């Protein structure tokens, strides 16, 4: 009779340990989800009407095309201003325009790369924890 009670206590203890491991993994998943919500906010860009969005590769392509148009406009401006004999400040304005367009394209590309890298790390860690949770549940089921 005592051995049966001890066996029941042992089984209950093992179940509690397995459940506590499962809760610990779920807590880790919740923590990295919260951390990602906070971290992802630093990558948000402002859109129209004070809306925000996360940078994606498709946004980078669209912004890259806009940057190329801005550079072409700056080149046309410089050539046009120089060919008309405008004072030196006018062609320089075109060069400044080109410089700003190039800087903006590089900054956007950097932001997209940083966001994609951080998102990939987050998803990888989350996937690992979900796999660990699934393995733990399977282990509990088999017992």
Image (tube, rainbow, N blue to C red):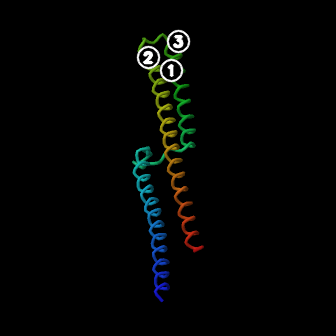
Q: Which mark is residue 83?
A: 3
Judged left or right of residue 62, residue 87 is left
Point 44% across, 44% down: residue? 43
Asked if the residue at tag 1 contacts the one at tag 2, i.e. Cβ–Cβ closer than 8 Å, the answer is: yes
Query: What SS does tag 2 mark?
Result: helix
Q: Residue 90 carries which label?
A: 2
| Front-lying residue, 75 or 87 | 75
The first of marks 3 and 2 along the sequence is: 3
Quadrant hosting residue 28: bottom left
Q: Mark 1 points at which residue?
A: 77
Point 47% across, 65% down: residue? 21
Distance between the Cα atoms at labels 1 and 3?
Answer: 10 Å
96 vs 61: above or below: above
Distance between the Cα atoms at labels 3 and 2?
Answer: 11 Å
Quadrant hosting residue 87: top left
The first of marks 2 and 1 along the sequence is: 1
């Amino acid at each position: 009779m005592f051995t049966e009670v001890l066996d029941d206590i042992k089984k209950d203890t093992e179940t509690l340990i397995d459940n506590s491991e499962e809760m610990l993994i779920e807590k880790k998943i919740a923590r990295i989800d919260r951390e990602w919500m906070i971290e992802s906010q630093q990558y948000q860009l402002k859109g129209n009407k004070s809306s925000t969005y996360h940078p994606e590769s498709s946004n980078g392509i669209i912004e890259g095309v806009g940057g190329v148009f801005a550079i072409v406009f700056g080149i046309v401006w410089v050539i046009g201003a120089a060919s008309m004999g405008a004072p030196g400040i006018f062609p320089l304005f075109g060069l400044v325009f080109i410089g700003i367009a190039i800087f903006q394209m590089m900054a956007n590309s950097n932001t997209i790369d940083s966001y994609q890298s951080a998102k990939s790390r987050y998803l990888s860690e989350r996937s690992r924890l979900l796999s660990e949770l699934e393995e733990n549940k399977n282990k509990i089921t088999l017992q």
